[in-house]
Each structure stands twice: as C-alpha cells, then as structure tokens.
Amino acid sequence: MSNWLCVKEMLLDTDSIFAFVLMPFDESFDDIYKMGIKETAAQLDIVAERVDEQIFQEGILDRIYRQIDAADIIVADMSGQNPNVFYEVGYAHAKEKICLLLTSDTNDIPFDLKHHRHIVYGDSISNLRGMLSEELAWAKQQIENVKASHIKVSLKDLYGKLEKTKSSAKGKVTFKIDLLNESKKTSAEIEAIYFYSTSGWELEQDGKECPSTESDISDFDKRHFISPPLRKLHRNSWAQLKFSGSKYLAFARKGEEIKDEYKISGRTVIRLVTSEGNFDYELSLDVVCEEFPF
C-alpha cells in the first residue's frame, strides 16, 4: 500500500487534519521540514507531508496539485523565492486554502502577500516551532469551526472607492462574503453575525447603518451587527452577505496633499452566533480605494 493511502486511511479513521508542505527540494530544508514543521504539526494531531514522502503513479506536478486540493492546510516555505513554490502557493490561494507562509528572510515574502499570515523564523528552528505551533493551532480551530457549524466563510470580492475633498479622504469598501455548506448536513442555526473592525469604521447594510458596540476581542475596537441572509444552510447550499464599510483615511494638515488612492490591508473577524455556539472566522483584507472621475 502506498504511503499516501496509509495517510488517507489514517485521516478517515481519526478525522485528523492534513497539512501539505511546499518547499524547495533541497537537503538544506530537511531539518526545517522534519523538526520545524512535521514534528510541530504532529504535536497538534495534524498530519504534515511533503510530496517526496509519497508513492504515486502520476507526474509530480499533477500529484502536487491533487494534494493541494486534498489538503486542509498549506504550509509553504518561501525562502529563496523558489518559483515552483510561488506558483503552487498561487494555486492554493485560488483554491481558497488556508495558507501558512514561512521564510528565513522577510524580503522573500512578496509585498502583495505580506497581509497574509506569515512567519519569519530567521535561522532558528526553535523560533519556527514556537511560531508555527500558534499558527497551526489557529488554522486547526478555523477548520474545526467549519466542521462543527457546517458553514464555510469566504471573502469573495472587495471593491474600494475614495471620496476625496481638499481636506479629507474617505474610503468606502463593498464586501461580499460567501457562506457555504459543503457538507451533507444542515448547518447550525445562525442567530446573529458580527463583523469586527478597528476604530473609525461605520458599516451599512441594505442602505441602513449597522449597529455597533465595543469589541470583546482584544485586537479590535468595534463589533458591528450584520443581519444574516438566512437562518440555516441546507446541505450543499450557499448564501451571501453584502454590506459596505467606510472610514476616513486621511486629513490634510499643514499643507499635506490628499492622495488619489489609499491601500487598506489587514485582517478582520466574522463571528457567527449559532445554536451550536459562537464560531470566529478570520479574513484577510487587501483593497485599494481610489477616486474615479465618473
């Protein structure tokens, strides 16, 4: 029996989480993989594997793409900016996989990926183990949320617009967030939805201001109430949240010029309050608000 079939049977038997590891095929990465990644994942009951540990019949690229499709988590070492790893990470992002990016040098993480979760471990496997353990625990919780609630939360589109005057710039972001039930069971009943933000944000849904209050999560200042699109998601069903958020991004002071565009990046949390408990989903934000002449 192939190594992968053994792993697959173990996943089915124990309901373990599978992390597929992307990194250059170079012996200099072996200790990083074995001691830094694989052992750390095993301590959290996560099965981590590289493609070179598996026995398979198809071409190696086909195998890699199939394993990305099958994985719950992608762990990718971007050190050295290996083009194959970069391409595979792009494929994983397109498949909306949870991707944990690693590097020994922060310059190896491209600018447009820096808002994604990433670890800079330098030359220390001990640092890698400590930071990766926290990230894997977070990823495991995200996956367990989907399994328990039968609801997957996915940020689909962000559209930014800049409302500019001589003295200020106000960004308005339109959000579309998919709620999917890809399981064979009806989801937990959704009683409320909260969107967490930093200070200064105001939200609107269907032309009405969303009520807000102080956040109960330490990294955020406000939580906003979003009306659920429906109460339950039946098997293989889908619904979408649509709302907008606005915030002043700049004020002209001491002759400072207001720019034509501003980038908003960071993270937010969507909390589903359900009959089965609260489930928090972290989303990465990356959008440019710019002024249009028409």
Image (cartoon, helix red, strand yellow):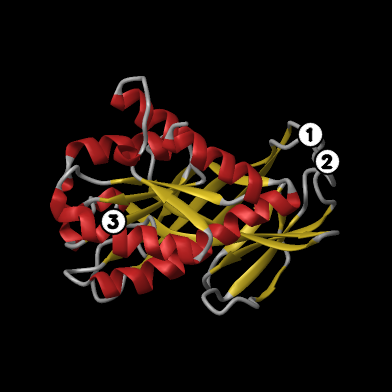
Asked which secondary structure carries label 1, the reply is loop
Asked which secondary structure carries label 2, the reply is loop
Query: Does residue 146 lie above or below 219 as drawn?
Result: above
Q: Quadrant of the C terminus?
A: top left
Tally the marks: 3
Residue 121 in the image: x percent, y percent?
A: 24, 68
Q: Are marks 2 and 1 in contact (CB under 8 Å)?
A: yes
Q: Which disc is residue 214 wearing?
A: none
**Distance between the alpha carbons at the discs numbered 2 and 1:** 5 Å
Circle 3 residues within 10 Å: few <14, some 14–19, many ≥20: many
**Distance between the alpha carbons at the discs numbered 2 and 3:** 39 Å
Circle 2 residues within 10 Å: few <14, some 14–19, many ≥20: some
Front in this rendered view, residue 134 or 51: 51
Which of label 1 and label 3 is nearer to you?
Answer: 3
Query: Does residue 221 lie above or below 22 as drawn?
Result: below
Asked which secondary structure carries label 3, the reply is helix
Query: Which residue is rendered at x = 37% and y = 26% of the image?
Result: 56
Q: Which disc is residue 33 wearing?
A: 3
Residue most extreme to the front: 1
Q: Is residue 247 visible?
A: no
Disc 2 residue type (three-letter): Thr
From the image, tell me which residue sits under label 2.
186
Query: Which residue is rendered at x = 28% and y = 75% of the image?
Result: 126
From the image, tell me which residue sits under label 1.
235
Query: Which residue is rendered at x = 69% and y = 50% of the image?
Result: 147
Q: Is residue 185 left or right of residue 238?
A: right
Residue 254 in the image: x percent, y percent?
A: 25, 76
Disc 1 residue type (three-letter): Arg
Circle 1 residues within 10 Å: few <14, some 14–19, many ≥20: some
Residue 275 in the image: x percent, y percent?
A: 86, 59
- Mark earlier in primary sequence (1, 3): 3
The image quadrant of residue 211 is bottom right
